[in-house]
């Protein structure tokens, strides 16, 4: 333990190390150059394995934009206006060249890439890939931080109760809410599931919003002061549950229509198209302009690493006007960072609507559970002026602890927990079928949006996430996914057709973590990975069509590759 702590205190080194410890990684020799894994100095015996400067390759046949962070780029005016960084000031010139080298897309599909198994960098969990695979702490946090992680986990699992209560610092639930604990939505820290039969919507919610209706509201969104506008009665989300003395707002109703799709080799796949409505409305009708958008809770792994991807690296993949003509035009969602009051890059949520884990957590506490925090000081959650009985209920604020129901220490612990849920190690990374599927993933153009790898920023105070080579398979940008997946709901800069590219790491463990359930896309309509791919439209049409036209063996290999993530 003392040696581990000394390593964590090691001074910054001008070049990144591919591993920690004295021995070279298994399976490497002088002919191989492993990629970045940590931020520590390697042993002298292995320093020859450090990546060296490499020539940039455009790889246009894979339609993958490279992260050329040291090249001057003609950025769109809307990005420059928000003063977002377009270069990596956290790295030296030598580091920039090395980062470009290790993040360049591979052309060799005969073997795994160096450190590809460690898809979450040095923090990758090597625990058994079982039902708890998404609930492990980052492997590179300190012993003291592990205790903080466990406290955060306890709060993440805590069932809040209504006020007033004899239970200290645990009341304030609702008054209107969807669930009583974070863990009840993020099932075992994984993704949720749509309603099954008569089950309630414990891990999929209906977001309620309308677009700007006049010039003043349009200006409000342009200034990043609002993402959209809530329903005047039911607010930003339908809450199906309520504390005693109140009625829940209503119930989500979903019906499915099966639509067969024939693939190139004659195989048939049935896709289910959902239709949503609200029944049993308790407080009057919805506004006619209100749109309904179902949102499945996403998995929690790797969030701290995503938060430390440098904005310049994300923006390097943006091509709003599709100037290169490849049909891919990823855009950032520029949102207000509530902690700084300035525009920032949206990273989290299905439409990249939150700039930080802390803000995303605060919004979820307020909207899903009805718990106020310094970042979202709404003691009555999502209650509106049209629901006066809700606003008249007691709240859980205790003056001796702070002026919100989840004061700063609580938010610190929940945020730390969310930042340090480890990404599990990959399985069978060198399998023949997996490697064949990886080639297909590249050649079909999937990597145009599902960017394989990044190197996190070096200057973050969160040292466990600093300067890590990670493999999220996402560009974290907005893409038009076509009318089939559209919800018609604007969220900041995101249109009703646009969705953030979800990271794919851990996707192969979805069913194992979810108790046999595996539902994909923002509303869980896809019952397996094949259906999820075939629902791609818009910018994903070409990749989808290549998958549909492929032979059965190639399709199976691609799915096997995804299952290895």
Image (spheres, rainbow, N blue to C red):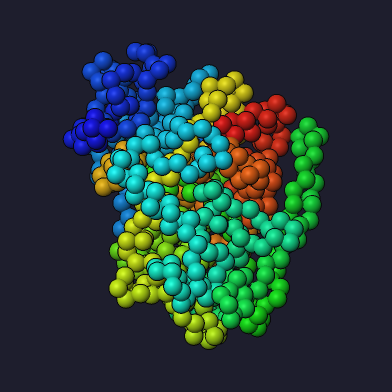
Front residue (pair 47, 325) = 47
Front residue (pair 509, 68) = 509
Q: Residue furthest left?
A: 11
What residue is rendered at 63% in x and 41% in y?
511
Q: Is residue 77 above or below residue 145?
A: below
Return the x and y of residue 549 as percentages of the image width and height: 71, 34
What residue is rendered at 53% in x and 81% in y?
390
Return the x and y of residue 263 as percentages of the image width and height: 76, 37
Q: Quadrant of the N terminus?
A: top left
Q: Can I make out residue 69 in this image?
A: no
Q: Is residue 481 above or below residue 550?
A: below
Q: Residue furthest front?
A: 166
Left of 53 or right of it: where is 204? right
Q: Can I make out residue 245 in this image?
A: yes
Return the x and y of residue 354 as percentages of the image width and height: 43, 59
Q: Is residue 200 above or below residue 316?
A: below
Q: Quadrant of the C terminus?
A: top right
Q: Quadrant of residue 32?
A: top left
Q: Quadrant of residue 293?
A: bottom right
Q: Quadrant of residue 45?
A: top left
What residue is rendered at 51% in x and 32% in y?
128
Q: How many marks?
A: 0
Left of 397 or right of it: where is 129? right
Q: Is residue 82 above or below residue 459?
A: below
Return the x and y of residue 493 as percentages of the image width and height: 48, 62
Front residue (pair 433, 86) = 433
What residue is rendered at 66% in x and 43% in y?
516
Left of 223 or right of it: where is 181? right
Front residue (pair 301, 327) = 301
């Amino acid at each position: 333990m003392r040696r581990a702590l000394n390593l964590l205190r090691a001074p910054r080194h001008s070049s990144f190390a591919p591993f920690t410890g004295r021995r070279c990684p298994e399976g490497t020799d002088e002919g191989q150059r492993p990629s970045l894994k940590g931020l520590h100095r390697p042993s002298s015996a292995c320093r020859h394995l450090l990546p060296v400067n490499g020539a940039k390759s455009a790889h246009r046949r894979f339609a993958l934009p490279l992260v050329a962070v040291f090249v001057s780029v003609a950025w769109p005016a809307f990005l420059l206006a928000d003063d977002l960084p377009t270069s990596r000031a956290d790295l030296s010139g030598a580091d920039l060249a090395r980062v470009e080298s290790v993040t360049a897309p591979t052309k060799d599909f005969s073997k795994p890439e160096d450190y590809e198994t460690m898809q979450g960098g040095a923090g990758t969990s090597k625990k058994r890939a079982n039902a708890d695979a998404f609930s492990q702490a980052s492997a590179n946090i300190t012993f003291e931080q592990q205790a903080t992680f466990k406290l955060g986990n306890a709060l993440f699992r805590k069932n809040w109760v209504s006020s007033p209560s004899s239970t200290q610092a645990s009341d304030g639930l609702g008054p209107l809410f969807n669930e009583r604990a974070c863990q009840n939505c993020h099932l075992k820290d994984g993704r949720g599931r749509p309603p099954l039969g008569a089950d309630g919507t414990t891990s999929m919610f209906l977001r309620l919003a309308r677009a700007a209706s006049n010039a003043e509201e349009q200006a409000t969104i342009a200034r990043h002061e609002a993402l959209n506008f809530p329903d005047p009665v039911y607010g930003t989300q339908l809450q199906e549950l309520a504390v005693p003395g109140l009625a829940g707002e209503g119930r989500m109703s979903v019906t499915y229509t099966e639509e067969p799709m024939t693939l190139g080799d004659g195989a048939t796949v049935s896709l289910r198209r959902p239709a949503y409505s609200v029944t049993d409305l308790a407080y009057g009708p919805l506004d006619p302009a209100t749109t309904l958008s179902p949102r499945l809770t996403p998995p929690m792994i790797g969030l701290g690493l995503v938060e430390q991807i440098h904005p310049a690296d994300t923006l390097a993949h943006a091509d709003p006007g599709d100037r290169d003509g490849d049909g891919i035009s990823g855009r950032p969602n520029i949102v207000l960072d509530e902690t700084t009051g300035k525009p920032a890059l949206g990273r989290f949520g299905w439409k990249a609507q939150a700039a930080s884990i802390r803000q995303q957590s605060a919004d979820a506490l307020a909207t899903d559970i009805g718990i106020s925090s310094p970042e979202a000081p709404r003691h009555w959650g999502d209650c509106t002026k049209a629901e006066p009985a809700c606003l008249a209920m007691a709240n859980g604020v205790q003056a001796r602890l702070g002026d919100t129901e989840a004061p700063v220490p609580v938010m610190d612990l929940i945020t730390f927990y969310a930042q340090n849920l480890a990404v599990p190690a990959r399985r069978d990374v060198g399998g023949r079928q997996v490697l064949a599927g990886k080639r297909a993933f590249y050649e079909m153009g999937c990597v145009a949006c599902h960017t394989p790898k990044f190197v996190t920023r070096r200057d973050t105070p969160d040292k466990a996430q600093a300067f890590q080579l990670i493999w999220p398979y996402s560009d974290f940008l907005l893409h038009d996914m076509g009318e089939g997946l559209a919800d018609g709901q604007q969220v900041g800069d995101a249109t009703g057709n646009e969705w953030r590219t979800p990271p794919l790491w851990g996707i192969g463990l979805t069913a194992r973590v979810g108790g046999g359930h595996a539902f994909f896309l923002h509303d869980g309509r896809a019952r397996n990975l094949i259906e999820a791919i075939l629902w791609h439209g818009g910018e994903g049409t070409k990749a989808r069509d290549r998958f549909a036209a492929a032979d059965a063996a190639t399709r199976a290999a691609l799915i096997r590759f995804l299952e290895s993530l």
